[in-house]
Amino acid sequence: MACFLAPATEAIVVSAAAHHNRKVSKDNSSESKQQESVTFSSYLVQKLQWLSTLLWGGSFLLLIEHIWHGEIVPWFPFLTALNNPNDISPMLTEIATVGTAMALTVTFTWFIAVAVCYMALKKQSDKSIVTD
C-alpha cells in the first residue's frame, strides 16, 4: 500500500545529513588539511551518500511497483487506501512494520558494506606503512 514511505522518509533525512556533511567538509578542507588517519565514524559519515542512493533507489522502485498494481493513482488522495477509512489502519500498520523493516535492512546492509570497505582501506594503509 504505502510501505515505500518509510524508506523515503529515511532517504530525506539521510540526504539532508549528507548534504550538510558535504558543506561542512568543503568548508573545513579550505581551512585545513585532512587528517592522515580516518576513524570509522568519520568514514561512516563520508559514505552517507551511498545510503541515500540506496534508499532513494529502493523507494523509487517501490513507488513504480505500487503504481503498477494500482495502489497509487494520479488523483487525490493518491493512495487508494485513503479512499476507504477502513483501509487506513492496515496501511499505517504496513508502513510501520514492512516499511520500517525494509528501511532498517537497507541501513544494516549499508553499514556492513561500509565496515568491509573501511577494513579493506585500513588493511591497505597498514600494508603501505609497513612497506615504506
Image (cartoon, rainbow, N blue to C red):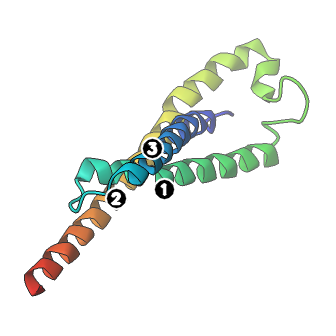
Tell me residue 110's x, y (percent): 40, 54
CB-based contact (under 8 Å), mark 2 and mark 3:
no
According to the picture, the residue beneath numbered tag 1 turns out to be 50
Crowdedness near tag 3: few (<14), some (14–19) or many (≥20) residues, C-alpha within 10 Å: some
The residue that appears at 72% across and 44% down in the rendered structure is: 63
Q: Is label 2 in a helix, a strand or a loop?
A: helix
The residue that appears at 39% across and 47% down in the rendered structure is: 28
Disc 3 or 1, which lies upstream in sequence? 3
Outermost residue toward the right? 75
Out of 66 and 129, give the one closest to the viewer: 129
The type of residue carrying mark 2 is Val
For the residues marked 2 and 1, what is the alpha-carbon distance in whole angstroms?
9 Å
According to the picture, the residue beneath numbered tag 2 turns out to be 114
57 in relation to 78, above or below: below
Q: Which mark is residue 11?
A: none
The type of residue carrying mark 1 is Trp
Apparent side of residue 71 relative to residue 99 in the rendered image (left or right): right
The type of residue carrying mark 3 is Asn
According to the picture, the residue beneath numbered tag 3 turns out to be 21
Q: Is label 3 in a helix, a strand or a loop?
A: helix
Number of marks present in the image shown: 3
83 in relation to 109, above or below: above
Out of 79 and 32, give the one closest to the viewer: 32
Out of 120 and 132, give the one closest to the viewer: 132
For the residues marked 2 and 3, what is the alpha-carbon distance in whole angstroms?
17 Å
Disc 2 or 1, which lies upstream in sequence? 1
For the residues marked 3 and 1, what is the alpha-carbon distance in whole angstroms?
13 Å
CB-based contact (under 8 Å), mark 2 and mark 1:
yes
Outermost residue toward the bottom? 131
